[in-house]
Image (cartoon, rainbow, N blue to C red):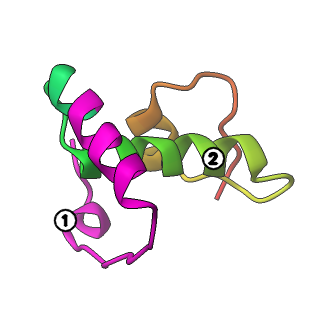
């Protein structure tokens, strides 16, 4: 279930090598995923892995399927 915060979006623009972009899009398509879905998952995983002592909100941990990493907000 998405929270009100997750229904809002913000744009992240990045530059990458066109060959990597094409290969990334091809691999995403073979997994029936959009590049945006994959990037959002990578960002969630990165945040959880590198949050340090920062509290992680329940909606972030629930969206990732991670267990045992939740810290009170």
Say what secondary structure mark 1 lies in.
Answer: helix
Disc with the residue nearer the chain's start (1 vs 2): 1
On screen, residue 29 versus residue 25, left or right, reads: left
Split into 4 quadrants, where in the image is the C terminus? bottom right
Quadrant housing residue 30: top left
Say what secondary structure mark 2 lies in.
Answer: helix
> Could you classify mark 1 by the number of other residues whose Cα lies within 10 Å: few (under 14), some (14-19), or many (20 or more)?
few
As measured in the structure, the alpha-carbon distance from the residue carrying label 1 to the one carrying label 2 is: 21 Å
Instruction: Classify 11 as above or below 39.
Output: below
Split into 4 quadrants, where in the image is the N terminus? top left
Residue drawn at point x = 84 percent, y = 52 percent: 52
Where residue 63 appears, x then y in whole percent? 39, 38
Where residue 19 appears, x then y in whole percent? 37, 50
Where residue 42 appears, x then y in whole percent? 49, 43
| Magenta stretch holds residue 5 | yes
Residue drawn at point x = 35 percent, y = 59 percent: 18
Asked whether 58 or 28 is in front, the reply is 28
Q: Which residue is mark 2?
A: 46
Where residue 69 appears, x then y in whole percent? 69, 32
> Could you classify mark 2 by the number of other residues whose Cα lies within 10 Å: few (under 14), some (14-19), or many (20 or more)?
few
Q: Which mark is residue 7?
A: 1
Question: Start and end of the magenta stretch?
Answer: 1-27
């Amino acid at each position: 279930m998405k929270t009100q915060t997750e229904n809002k979006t913000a744009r992240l623009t990045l530059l990458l090598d066109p060959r990597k972009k094409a290969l990334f899009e091809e691999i995403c398509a073979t997994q029936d995923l959009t590049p945006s879905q994959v990037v959002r998952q990578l960002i969630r995983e990165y945040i959880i892995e590198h949050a340090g002592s920062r509290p992680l909100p329940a909606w972030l941990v629930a969206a990732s399927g991670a267990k045992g990493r939740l810290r009170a907000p």
